[in-house]
């Protein structure tokens, strides 16, 4: 491990000085193979700016801060299992009213028509726009399900320490991070319709209770994605490291 | 651009750190900065990257470093353009709606205002944050960081502002909003006439420019600058103090 000393990222030296952290002695000797993680080397990657800082011993809440950007330094995201499960369970519960209750109410010439998420997709198919209907189907049905199911599976497999297809599971987390935001589509569409169609007697669009539940699902799944730490997928490689 | 794992072009000189003697006997390799993968924590020594190249983790494929030519200049140009387009997109109507001889227009924030008026204020707040507040704050923070950097100064509140840029990224959903506009147009096309307003054209260009501003930005470069300046200004030790228990 000595080869590491002296050539870590800038600012590392001052972190060592201030935090009383010394040469890395956390990783047991003879332990590391060709693949060494930052944690095994006694380093912490700042989640905000990517700086590698050396610390001697870092519990979850020691109150150490990144010497470069002052963000709290943590070896892993805090309480991953508790936080992510909370967000996921809440999202899964709210997913039911989000799909069962009407998302919007279109009042046109006195007759009101209520639309659920799936109903909106069906209506788009009916108007002869299958491409757009598929996009909406993907954004408002597939993406939330993928997020809830995918994250639950990632979390479960990480907690169990499964070694199966780590690389693909890391990719799945990246995919969820990228496509997650697209489930806001329905909320935006509702907001645009509500802001545009305001002809009092002729036509108006109002939000329904389903929209509130659906928005909550979107926010909760975004939070769940952010609170999961993909490094846990790889941590089980060397369980003897503290 | 380069992708893939070990051995792909552009990942040259990028390998998991070899243990012990190997790293020592090659001082040039040892001088390369250590980078830990964001997704799997594996340590790598990253060689100087050619412009436009991306270094990826050999184990999980996560992005380790990206090198962009004239990163600060180009990002600043795209950001300044975005700021201008953002103002235009918010002042001119997005869509014009004609039905039964009556005409209605909406601007970017009309949707939030209407939702709030109907009493759905959490929805209104979410839409406002994702389509107006987060993108605006993000552009402002980027300008606040990049303009002084371009002039060779260290911006006031640099660290907070630049962290804000990254923190707001997941909540800034301009492109999703755009797709929402498209779906809304199709939904209404059966019952009324819908025209695109000047604001929508500005909005489309805003998506292009703000995406480009982020894509060409070399975050590591900006952060390295921060490290250097903060150290000179004597701020580094204080930042590192924390409230150690």
Image (cartoon, coloured by chain):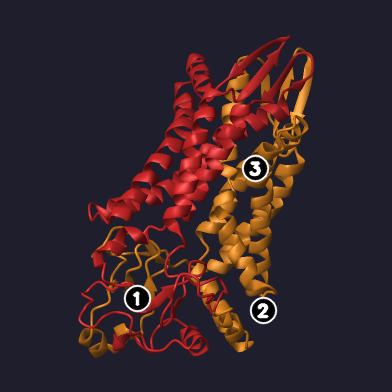
Chain colours: A red, B orange
Subunit of label 2? B
Position of residue A109 in the picture relative to residue B131 (left or right):
right
Position of residue B181 in the picture relative to residue A195 (left or right):
left
Q: Earlier in the sequence, mark 1 or mark 2?
A: 1
Using the rendered image of the protein, determine whether residue A87 is visible from the camera's viewpoint. yes
Q: Which residue is mark 2?
A: B153
Label 3 to label 2: alpha-carbon separation? 36 Å
How busy is the neighbourhood of tag 2: few (under 14 within 10 Å), some, or many (20 plus)? few
A190 in relation to B73, above or below: above
Subunit of label 1? B
Counting from the top left corner in percent of width and height, residue B236 is at 58, 84
Counting from the top left corner in percent of width and height, residue B67 is at 44, 68
Counting from the top left corner in percent of width and height, residue A206 is at 69, 24
Q: Which residue is mark 3?
A: B126
How busy is the neighbourhood of tag 3: few (under 14 within 10 Å), some, or many (20 plus)? many
Label 1 to label 2: alpha-carbon separation? 28 Å
Q: Earlier in the sequence, mark 3 or mark 2?
A: 3
Name the disc covering residue B47, or none: 1
Counting from the top left corner in percent of width and height, residue A56 is at 41, 83
């Amino acid at each position: 491990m000595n080869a590491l000393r002296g050539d870590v990222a800038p600012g590392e030296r001052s972190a060592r000085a201030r935090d009383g952290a010394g040469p890395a002695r956390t990783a047991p000797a003879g332990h590391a193979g060709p693949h060494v993680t930052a944690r095994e080397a006694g380093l912490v990657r700042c989640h905000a700016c990517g700086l590698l800082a050396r610390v001697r011993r870092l519990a979850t809440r020691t109150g150490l801060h990144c010497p470069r950007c002052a963000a709290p330094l943590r070896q892993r995201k805090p309480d991953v299992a508790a936080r992510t499960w909370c967000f996921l369970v809440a999202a899964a519960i709210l997913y039911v009213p989000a799909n069962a209750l009407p998302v919007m109410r279109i009042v046109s010439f006195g007759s009101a028509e209520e639309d659920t998420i799936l109903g909106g997709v069906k209506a788009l198919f009916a108007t002869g726009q299958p491409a757009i209907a598929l996009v909406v189907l993907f954004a408002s049905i597939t993406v939330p399900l993928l997020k809830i199911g995918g994250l639950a599976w990632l979390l479960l497999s990480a907690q169990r320490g499964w070694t199966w297809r780590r690389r693909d599971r890391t990719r799945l987390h990246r995919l969820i991070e990228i496509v997650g935001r697209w489930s806001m589509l329905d909320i935006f569409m509702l907001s645009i319709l509500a802001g545009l169609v305001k002809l009092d007697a002729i036509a108006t669009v109002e939000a329904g209770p389903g929209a509130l539940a659906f928005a909550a699902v979107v926010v909760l799944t975004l939070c769940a994605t952010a609170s999961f730490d993909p490094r846990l997928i790889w941590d089980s490689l060397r369980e003897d490291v503290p | 651009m380069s992708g893939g794992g070990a051995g792909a072009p552009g990942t040259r000189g990028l390998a998991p750190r070899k243990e012990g003697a190997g790293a020592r006997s090659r001082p040039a390799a040892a001088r390369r900065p250590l980078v830990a993968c964001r997704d799997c924590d594996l340590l790598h020594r990253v060689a100087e990257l050619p412009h436009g190249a991306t270094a990826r983790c050999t184990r999980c494929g996560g992005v380790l470093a990206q090198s962009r030519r004239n990163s600060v200049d180009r990002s600043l140009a795209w950001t300044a353009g975005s700021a201008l387009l953002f103002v235009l997109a918010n002042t001119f109507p997005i869509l014009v709606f004609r039905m039964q001889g009556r005409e209605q227009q909406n601007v970017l924030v009309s949707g939030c205002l209407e939702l709030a008026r109907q009493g759905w204020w959490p929805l209104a707040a979410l839409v406002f944050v994702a389509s107006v507040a987060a993108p605006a704050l993000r552009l402002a923070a980027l300008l606040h960081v990049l303009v002084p950097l371009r002039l060779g100064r260290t911006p006031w509140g640099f660290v907070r502002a630049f962290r804000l840029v990254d923190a707001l990224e997941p909540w800034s959903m301009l492109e999703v909003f755009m797709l929402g506009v498209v779906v809304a147009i199709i939904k209404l096309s059966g019952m009324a006439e819908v025209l695109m307003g000047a604001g929508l054209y500005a909005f489309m260009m805003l998506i292009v420019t703000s995406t480009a501003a982020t894509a060409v930005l070399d975050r590591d470069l900006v952060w390295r600058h921060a490290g250097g300046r903060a150290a000179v200004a004597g701020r580094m030790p204080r930042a590192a103090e924390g409230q150690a228990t």
